[in-house]
Amino acid sequence: MKSDVKILIVDDNEQDQKIIGHILGRMGLRNLSYASNGAEAIQKAATEQPDLIVLDTVLPDFDGFEVLAQIKSRQTKTEIKTKTVMMTGSIEAVKAFEAGKAASLGVDDYVAKTADFTALTESIRKLLSLE
């Protein structure tokens, strides 16, 4: 496993943060940081330069797309290319209404936010080539 991979988990639900962190830890991924809102995520992405961001689409201050746009706009000035998995409770709605926007922002994958986080685990394995 790639234990040196830096992952930023952005979710305003502290319980979901803990669950995702636990799941990633079991995958051998230990270099994790957390953000509970968009502003914090933007700041941490700039300073920590994560390899992967797990980003909820609904945050208290910004939506996930706005957060991602700000992160990616800063990265265009550097060689950093952070991968992004967006989570949502309404995957079909996001795909229908935001697919064009997400593609233009460089979203690498969408996953439905479910109780078991199986899709998220599979997405992270694929994006980080952990198979």
Image: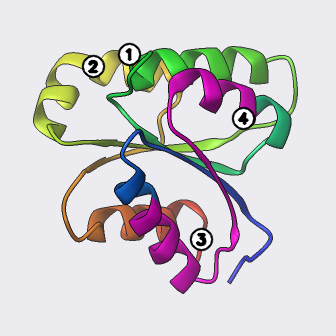
Would you say the residues marked 4 and 3 are in contact, meaning their CB atoms lie under 8 Å apart?
Answer: no
Calculate the distance from the C-alpha at mark 4 to the C-alpha at mark 3.
21 Å
Would you say the residues marked 3 and 1 are in contact, meaning their CB atoms lie under 8 Å apart?
Answer: no
Would you say the residues marked 2 and 3 are in contact, meaning their CB atoms lie under 8 Å apart?
Answer: no
The residue at 84%/34% (across/down) is 47
**Which disc number belongs to residue 45?**
4
* Image side of residue 76 versus residue 57, left or right: right
In the rendered image, residue 33 lying in the magenta stretch gets the answer yes
For the stretch drawn in magenta, what is the main secondary structure?
helix
Tell me if residue 42 comes above or below residue 36 in the rendering: above
| Disc with the residue nearer the chain's start (1 vs 4) | 4
Q: Residues within 10 Å of mark 4 (few under 14, many from 20)?
A: many
Which quadrant of the rendered structure holds the N terminus? bottom right
Calculate the distance from the C-alpha at mark 1 to the C-alpha at mark 4.
20 Å
Q: Residues within 10 Å of mark 1 (few under 14, many from 20)?
A: some
Total label count? Answer: 4
**Which disc number belongs to residue 101?**
1
Q: Which residue is mark 2?
A: 98
Would you say the residues marked 1 and 2 are in contact, meaning their CB atoms lie under 8 Å apart?
Answer: yes
In percent of width and height, residue 64 lies at 42, 26
Q: Nearer the viewer, residue 7 or 109?
A: 7
Q: Which residue is mark 3?
A: 129
Pair 2/4: label in front: 4
| Disc with the residue nearer the chain's start (2 vs 3) | 2
| Disc with the residue nearer the chain's start (2 vs 4) | 4
The residue at 86%/32% (across/down) is 79
Q: Which residues are magenta?
A: 18-45
**Label 3: element kind:** loop
Amino acid found under the numbered disc labelled 3: Ser
**Label 1: element kind:** helix
